[in-house]
Image (tube, rainbow, N blue to C red):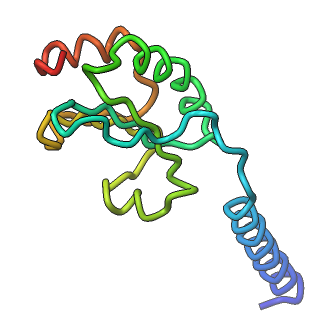
Amino acid sequence: MSNLGKIIIFLLLIAIIVTIKIKQNEKIKPTTPIPVTVVKSQSATLPRFLELGSDACEPCKMMMPVLAEMRKEYAGKLQVDFIDVFQNKTITAKYGVQFIPTQIIFDANGVEIFRHTGFFPKEEIVKKLIKLKVL
């Protein structure tokens, strides 16, 4: 192998190492908490809409007003929660989260009955909740 080939390989390795280090630093940056917190179970008999996401994700940010509206409109009928997966790392394993945002609907017994990933418009959520006989 020529000296030029060795130099190119060396530079590629350095670029890979630098990229990995940058990605590692991005993962440990502190995040600003979203002003939506996990609501503790109000009742063992309420169905639950759970959003698993992060404040570093645009679709997650777009879901925040939807969650706030649902929390207000369906108070006493539906528990609406948000959990930041980067601040609660054990949650991703517990719920098997692979993409964010992930929304999970649980029946009144706490059994998962539906799962969605990505932005979920309020109108579609309500349709799904009605179809699942949660509302």
Q: Is residue 38 left or right of residue 97?
A: right
> In front: 120, or 135?
135
- Residue drawn at point x = 32 percent, y = 56 percent: 96
Quadrant of the frame with the C terminus: top left
- Residue drawn at point x = 77 percent, y = 80 percent: 9
Expressed as whole percent of the image width and height from the top left, the position of residue 67 reads 46, 23
Residue 71 occupies quadrant: top left
- Residue drawn at point x = 43 percent, y = 31 percent: 118
> In front: 64, or 124?
64
Residue 79 occupies quadrant: top left
Quadrant of the frame with the N terminus: bottom right
Q: In the picture shown, does residue 89 fall above or below 21?
A: above
Expressed as whole percent of the image width and height from the top left, the position of residue 94 reads 32, 60
Q: In the picture shown, does residue 127 fall above or below 103?
A: above
Q: In the picture shown, does residue 133 fall above or below 113?
A: above
Q: Is residue 67 left or right of residue 49?
A: right
